[in-house]
Amino acid sequence: MARKPEATSIPPDTGEIDSDWNETSSVLDAMDRNSAGPTAVPPEPYEEYARRASHGHYLTDEQARRALSAPSMPIIDTSDVDELLGLSTRESGELEAPIPMLGQQRSGPYEIPLELGDDGEDLRLSERPTTPQLEPPPGFASTPTPRVEPPDQARWGDEAPTPTVTSPEALHALRKASTPGRSAIRSGAPVEGPEISISMSNAEDLDLDLDEPEGIYMEDSLELSLDNIPPAPFDLSRSPADFEPPPTRKVGAANSLELSLDDDGDALDLVAARATPVIQDPNDPLIDLRDRYAVGDFTGAHEIAESILAEDPTNSEALRFRESCRDVLTQMYTARLGSTSKVPRLAIPAAELQWLSLDHRAGFLLSCVDGRSSIEEILDVSGMPALDALRILYTLLQQQIIEVVGD
Amino acid sequence: MDRVIGIDLGTTNSCVAIVDGGTPTVIPNRGGYKTTPSMVAITEAGKRLVGHIAKRQAITNAENTVSSAKRLIGRKWNSSQVKNAVLTSSYRIVEGPHSDVRIQLRDSNYSVSEISAMVLQEMRVIAEDFLGESVSKAVITVPAYFNDNQRQATRDAGQIAGLDVIRIINEPTAAALAYGFGKNMEKLVAVYDLGGGTFDISILEIGAHGVFKVIATAGDTFLGGEDFDARIIDWLVQSFKEQHEIDLRQDRMALQRLKDAAEKAKCELSSVKETEINLPFIISSGRNEALHLQQTISRETLVTLCEDLVERTVEICKQTLLDAKLDKDEVEDVILVGGMTRMPKVQEAVGGFFQRDPCKGVHPDEVVALGAAIQGAALVDDSQEMILLDVTPHALGIMTFGSFFEELIPQNTTVPTARTKIFTTSRDNQTAVKILVMQGENQRAEENELLGEFILTGLRRAAKGQVEIEVTFEINADGIVSVSAKDLETGQQQSIQVTASSGLTKDEITEMIESAKDYMMERRSSEEFEAARQEAETLIAEIERLFPQVEVVVAASDFGREAVNKARRILKEAKEAIDNRDLTAIKNQIEALARTHRMFKGVVTKTQ
C-alpha cells in the first residue's frame, strides 16, 4: 500500500553510509534553499557542506563491515564508487578533494524514502555526528569494501526490487560544486539550468565505468545499480515552485520499496515515506535453512533442504544448499571415519548383532562389513547415496559396533 | 617366449590360468578367489566396477549392472534371444547403429563386446598383478554352439581389452584338454557343464597324441546356478511373508542380502546337510521395528526345490546322445564342469544317467581356463605335440526357393572340410541367381543366421530346371568359410569369403581400444597414487606418534630444535601433497618422511 510522504522522515544514523547520503542531500538542499522550496529540515549552510566535502569522508573497513552486516538494513556499499571517484579525481585532476558519496538523500520533500532496520534511530541531519577524516586510511582507495555475498546473488537480485540509482548527474553536480571557481552553487549564485542540469548522454564523459556496479547494492529490499543510467532524473535548474508534489509510488505486494530509474520513472517518482520492510514469512523453511547453514548446522540444513525439495524439486536455492551441505557433511564423515581406503570390521560378535537397535539400512551396511572390503568399496556396493552410507557407518563406529582398521 | 593366458569367459564367472613351469595354474584375483563374476557396473559417481564388487551391488544398482552379457554377444538386435533379454534384463538394452545390441549404463551406451572387454581387461589385470609382468596374448574359450559372429565378437572383445587373441576354442574342448593333459589316452568322454547361467553337454573323442574331437554338443542357455539361487530366494521370501506379512522382494537391499545368503547357503549345502540363514535387520516393519530373518535350510529342502532343474539337464544329455547316435554305455568318462556340479544331487543325477561315477580329477570351476592355458602354451611352444580337431558348431547352407534352408555342411562336421551340391533354376529364362549363405539348423531359412550373400549372373537362358549350378562350401583350418557358385554349362563362377562380424566397425573397435587404454592408464595411475598415499600416511602417523617423545628429548637439550622444525615442515608438506593428490610431490615427500621417521625412531630408542 502506498504510504503518504512524510516530510520529517529522515533516515536514522546507520553508520557512514547514511552520512554519505546526507552529504549529498546537503548539496541538494543547498539548491533547494536557493529556490526556497519547502523543507522540513533546516537546510545546511553551504559552508558546512564545503567544509565537510573538502575534508572528505571515507568509510573505514570496520565501518563498512558493520554497515554491511546490519540485518535488513538498506546497505549501500560505497567503496567501489569511492574508489572510483578517488581514481577519477587523481587521474583527471579535476577535483581537489575527494568527493563524498553520491546519491545521498535529500531532505525535505525530495527525500528518498528508505526503510531502515529496527535498531535504526532517526536523526536529524543537523544532529548527526560528523567525524571528518582528513586522511583516508592507507591503501583504502585500492581496497574495496568487503562485500558479503548472499548465497544466491542472482536469485536475490530477482527477488529484491531494483529501486534506485545514484545519478551520475549528481556526481557531476558535486564535482562542479567542489571545484573552485566552477560552481554557481559554491558562490551562492542562483543555480542556472545549463550549469547544473545534466544530460545522461554525458555519462561517459565522467570517466566512470558505470557498468561496474559491484559493491553497490541494498540488501533485501533496496538495491543500487549503476548499470542502467536513466535519463536525467531531475532538473536542478527548476525553481522549487515548479516542483510538483512527488508522485506516490505504489508499494508492491511484498511490501518492499521499489525505486526504479527505468525510462518510466524519474526522481519525482520518489516517495517521501518510510519504506515498509520486507516481511518474510517466519514459517518460510528457506529462512531456517539459511540460518542453520550460516551457523554450521549442516545436518539440519540438509534435512530442511530435502524437505523443501520433496515439495518443490526445482527449488534452486534448496538444491544448492543441499549439494553444499552434502559436500561438507561427506567431508566431515570421511574425516571422522579416517580414510575411505580403511577397512571396517565388526567390533562385536555377530551373534550379538540382533540385540542391537538398528534399522534395516544399518543392517544392510553391516552385512557389507566383512573385514576385507574398504569403506570405499562398501560405499560402492551399498547403492545408497554416499552421504547416507557414511553417516550410518559413522554411527556404527560411534556405537562401537564396528571398528576401522588400517588399509 | 611370450606368456599366453587362458581365459574362460563365462556367462556368470570368468577364470584366468597360465602354464607356469609346465604346470597349468589358475590365477587368483586380489580377493583370493579363483573365479571372478562376469559382471560390470557403473556407479552413480561414474565409477566402473567389475567382478565381485559389481556382483555385491547388483540388486541395489540393478539398472546399471550388466550380468550375462555373454548371452547377447555377437547377436543381432532382431534376434529372438535379444528380444527375450530386453524383456527380462534389469539393465537397458538398446539397438545399436548396425542393428547390433548396445547396453545403456547411466548416460552411455556400450556394445556387448565392450562390456565383455571390461571383464577380459580385469582378467588381464589379475594375471599381470600375479605375474608381475605385462601380458598380451590370450586364448579365450566360447561355448561350442557359438556361431561365427559370436566368436568374432568375442575376439573383438579381447582386442578391445588389449589382448592378442591367438585362438578361440570351445569350452568342452578346453575341459577335455585339461582332463587329458599329461595322459596318453584314447577315450570318448562327456563334458557336463552346469555353470552359473548356462548348461552345456558335449561328447568328445580324445585320440592318441593329443587329438581332441568334439562329436556332439547341446545345451540350455537359460539354465544354471542362478536358477537354483532363485528357488531358495523364493522359499525364503515365502516363509518370511507367512511370518510377518511383508514381501522382502519390495526392498532392494533386502533382496540383495537374500541373494547373497541364498548363494552362500547353496554352496554350504554341498558339504553340510543343514545350514542357517541369518540376516539381522533385513527390513523395517510398518511400526518402524527392524525385523530379522532366521531360517534353517536342509539339503533335502534344496533338492526338493530344485529337482526339476536337475532333471532338465538330464533330458538334454539324453537328447544329445540320441543326436550323436551314441549309447550312454559308450561314454567312458564324464567330466563335470561348473560350480553347480558340486551339488551332490547333480552328481547323483549325472552318475545315474551315465551309469558311472563322474570324474573327480578336475576342478569344475577351473578346468576350462586350465585347458585354454594349456592350448595357449602349446601354440607358442612348438615342442608340445597337440592337435585340436574342432567341429562346426552349426550347419552351413544356402537359402532355396520357398525360403527353405538347404544344408551343405552338417553340424559337428570336423574342420577343415569342403562340400558341394548341385542346384537348378526355379524360373524360365532365369539369368541370375542370388546365393544367401546361412548358418543354423532350422529348415526355415529366416530362422537361421545370415552370414553373407552374392549374385551369380550370366546364366544361360533356358526353361526352369534346365540350368545347373554347383555350389561349394569350404571351411579351412582357421575356420574361414568360402562359398562359390558355378554355372556348370557356361563355367561362369562367383564366390564369396564369409567373414564374421561382431556388429562393430573397425573405427569403432579402434576407438574402444583407445578408450580402454585410457581407462587402464587412469586406473594404474590411481593405484599408484593410492599406494604412495598409503605409504606416506603410514609414515606420517608413525612420526606424529613419536613426536611428543622427541620433543621432550629436544626440550631438554640445546640441539635438535631445528630438526624438529624441519620435521614439522616435512609433515606439513606431505599432508599438503596428499590433499592436492600430487603423486610426484608425495613420492618426493616419502623419502623425507622415511628419513625423519628413522631419525625420530633413533632418538626415541637411544633415550629409552
Image: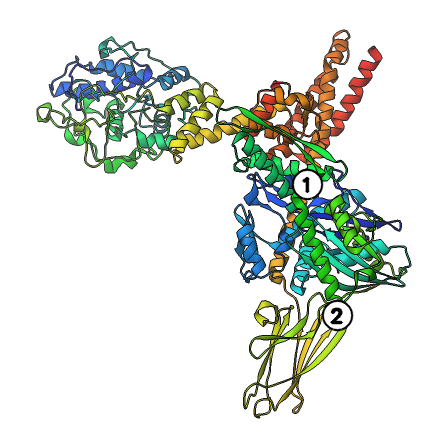
Measured from the top left, where is residue B603 in percent x and y? Answer: 81, 15
Helix, strand or loop for disc 1: helix
In the rendered image, which quarter is residue B424 located in? Answer: bottom right
Point out the image quarter for the C terminus of chain A.
Answer: top right
Q: Is residue A145 left or right of residue B402?
A: left
**Mark 1 or mark 2, which is nearer the start of the sequence?**
1
Between B194 and A256, the residue placed more toward the observer is B194
Is B486 located above or below residue A149 in the figure?
A: below
- Residue annotated with mark 1: B302
In the rendered image, which quarter is residue B549 located in? Answer: top right
Measured from the top left, where is residue A215 in percent x and y? Answer: 37, 27
Between A351 and A372, the residue placed more toward the observer is A351
Q: Residue at x 78, y 24 (%)?
A: B595
Q: Amino acid at mark 2?
A: Thr
Between B256 and B344, the residue placed more toward the observer is B344
Which of the labelled discs sits on residue B466, or is there none? none
Measured from the top left, where is residue A291 in percent x and y? Answer: 41, 20
Q: Is residue A182 left or right of residue B329?
A: left
Which of the labelled discs sits on residue B413, or is there none? 2
Which residue in the rendered view is the most extreme toward the top?
B556
Density class for disc 2 (Cα within 10 Å; few <14, some 14-19, many ≥20) is many
Is A328 located above or below residue B60 in the figure?
A: above
Which residue in the rendered view is the most extreme toward the left?
A241
Q: Residue at x 57, y 54 (%)?
A: B85
Q: Single out the mark in the foreground, 2 or 1.
A: 1
Measured from the top left, where is residue B120 in percent x and y? Answer: 70, 50
The reply to whether residue B465 is in sight is yes
